[in-house]
Image (cartoon, helix red, strand yellow):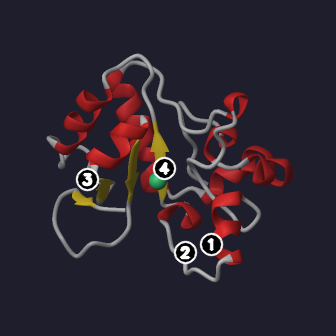
Amino acid sequence: MQKSKYFKGKELVSPEVYKIYGEEAIKFIAKDILIFLDLLREDLGVPILVNRPSVGITQRGLRTTIDSIVKDKVKNNKLYLSAHVLGRGVDFEVPSMDMKKVYERIINNPRRYSMITRIEDPNVTLAKGYIHVDNMETGKNGIYIFKP
Ligand SMILES: [Zn+2]
């Protein structure tokens, strides 16, 4: 099982998952994503936050059938194949840095961050205060910027 130097399972899955699996829940997060988070954390030298349960942010990592974002899709009979339900994507923020700079660092260093394949359109996510990355297949080289 891939471990993370800087991140605990608790930060990467919803509280419902953590309640059942505890720290072992980290096994649901793709190895590439754990490697990326540790590498970026090391490069930036400052904390990166995924879930922040203390302020009610709980669905930035793994999302499951009992988490509201997924539940709403099911209720409305909507297909939902987000990287978040596959453990292959995360949304994160870096409170002590300009998020645009963080975004540029990633997008300008596709070789260093080759374990991720996609980043969500910054015009959408930066406005909301986070960056989404995942390792979904794109059939393209480098880091592909996608629209939600
Ligand atoms: Zn996301």
Residue under pointer 4:
90
Discs 4/3, front: 4
| CB of mark 1 near ligand 1 (< 8 Å) | no
| Sequence-first disc among 2 and 1 | 1
Left or right placement of residue 66 versus residue 126 in this view:
right
Of 104 and 75, nearer the camera is 75
Circle on res. 114 = 3
Q: Position of residue 130 (x, y in %)?
A: 42, 38
x and y percent of residue 53 in the render? 70, 34
In what element is the residue under mark 2? loop
Which residue is depicted at the point 80% across and 52% down?
Answer: 16
Crowding near the residue tagged with mark 4, few <14, some 14–19, many ≥20 C-alpha atoms within 10 Å: many
- Binning the other alpha carbons within 10 Å of mark 2 as few (below 14), some (14 to 19) or many (20 upward) gives some
> Circle 1: is it few (<14), some (14-19), or many (20+) Cα within 10 Å?
few
Give the structural element (helix, strand or loop) at label 1. helix
Q: Residue at x 70, y 49 (%)?
A: 14
In space, the residues marked 1 and 3 are separated at their CA atoms by 31 Å
At mark 3, the secondary structure is: loop
Quarter of the view holding residue 38:
top left
Of circles 1 and 3, the one toward us is: 1
Tell me which label, 4 or 1, sits earlier in the chain.
1
**Do tag 2 and tag 1 residues touch (Cβ < 8 Å)?**
yes
Does the residue at mark 4 contact the one at mark 1 (Cβ under 8 Å)? no
User: Counting residues from the N terminus, which is met first, the one under dot 3 or under dot 2?
Assistant: 2
- For the C terminus, give its image quadrant: bottom left
Work out how far the residue at label 3 is from the one at label 2, CA to CA, in angstroms. Answer: 26 Å
Separation of residues labelled 2 and 4 (CA atoms) = 16 Å
Q: Is mark 4 within 8 Å of ligand 1?
A: yes
Q: Badge 2 is on which residue?
A: 80
Left or right: 39 as drawn, with respect to 18: left
Residue for badge 1: 73
Q: Residue visible at 77% across and 54% down?
A: 17
